[in-house]
C-alpha cells in the first residue's frame, strides 16, 4: 500500500466515524427514551445554594418596585406587624418583614413600625454595614 493511499484511507475512516456519530446524536435527540440525560438537561444549571430570606426578599421587592413605587404615609402605616413590617427611612419605603427575625437589635426594629424610622436607623447602635443592607429592602418612595 502506498503512503498516499494509506493517508487517504485513514482520512476517509475518520470522516466516516464523525458522520456516523453525528447521525447517532441527531437520532437520539429526536427519539423519546433515548439519552434522557441529554434531552432533559436544563438550559441552565440551577444553583444548589439555598435561597436565603434576603435573596427571596430582593426578588419580591424588585417585583413590587416595578408595579408601585410611591406610597402614602397611610399606606405604609398599615404595615406595622411581624407579618408585614415597612419602615420609612430618609423618605424611602422599606419592606423589612423578612429581616425582622435576623435583626441583631431584636424587636426594637418595631419602635416606629410603619412610620418614620430614620432617627433610629441612623442611631449609634448601628454599624456602617446597615447602609449596605438596607437597599435590599427598598420598595419605593414616600409620597411627598
Ligand atoms: C437594614 C437593617 C436594619 C434596620 C432596618 C434596622 C432598624 C432598626 C430600628 C428601626 C431600630 C429602632 C431604633 C429606635 O427607634 O430606637 C433598631 C434598633 C437596633 N438595631 Fe437595628 N436595624 C438594622 C440592622 C441592624 C444591625 C446590622 C445591627 C447590629 C449589628 C442592629 C442593631 C440594633 C440595635 C442594637 C438596636 C437597639 C436595640 C435596643 O435599643 O433595644 N441593627 N434597628
Image: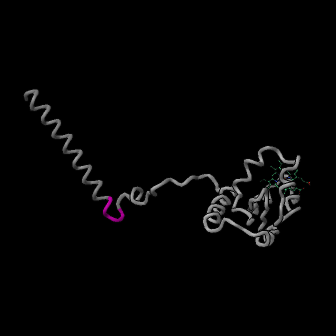
For the point 24% across and 54% down, the residue is 23
Residue 124 falls left or right of residue 68: right
Q: Residue at x 64, y 56 (%)?
A: 51
| Residue under the point 26% across and 50% down | 22
Main secondary structure type of the part rendered in magenta:
loop
The image quarter in which residue 57 lies: bottom right
Image quarter (top left, top right, bottom left or bottom right) of the C terminus: bottom right
Residue, far left: 2
Farthest residue to the front: give it. Answer: 144
> Does residue 83 appear in the picture of this structure?
no
* Picture quarter with the N terminus: top left
From which residue to which does the magenta span run? 29-33
Instruction: Residue at 34% x, 65% y: name it.
Output: 32
Q: Position of residue 101 (x, y in %)?
A: 80, 59
Would you say residue 50 sits in the magenta stretch? no
Give the quadrant of residue 30.
bottom left
Q: How many marks?
A: 0
Give residue 120's position: percent from left, percent from top. Answer: 87, 54
Q: Identify the residue at the far top of this view.
A: 3
Instruction: Name the spot of residue 56 as percent of width and height, x first.
Output: 66, 60
Asked if residue 58 shows in the view, the reply is yes
Q: Picture coordinates of residue 91 (x, y %)?
A: 76, 59
Amino acid at each position: 500500500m502506498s503512503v498516499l493511499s494509506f493517508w487517504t484511507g485513514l482520512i476517509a475512516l475518520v470522516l466516516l466515524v464523525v458522520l456516523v456519530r453525528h447521525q447517532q446524536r441527531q437520532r437520539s435527540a429526536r427519539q423519546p427514551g433515548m439519552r434522557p440525560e441529554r434531552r432533559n438537561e436544563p438550559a441552565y444549571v440551577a444553583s444548589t445554594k439555598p435561597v436565603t430570606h434576603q435573596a427571596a426578599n430582593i426578588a419580591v421587592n424588585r417585583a413590587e418596585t416595578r408595579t408601585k413605587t410611591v406610597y402614602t404615609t397611610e399606606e405604609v402605616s398599615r404595615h406595622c406587624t411581624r407579618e408585614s413590617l415597612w419602615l420609612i427611612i430618609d423618605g424611602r419605603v422599606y419592606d423589612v418583614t423578612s429581616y425582622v427575625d435576623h435583626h441583631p437589635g431584636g424587636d426594637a426594629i418595631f419602635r416606629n413600625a410603619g412610620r418614620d424610622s430614620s432617627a433610629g436607623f441612623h442611631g449609634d447602635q448601628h454599624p456602617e454595614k446597615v447602609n449596605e443592607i438596607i437597599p435590599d429592602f427598598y420598595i419605593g418612595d414616600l409620597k411627598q
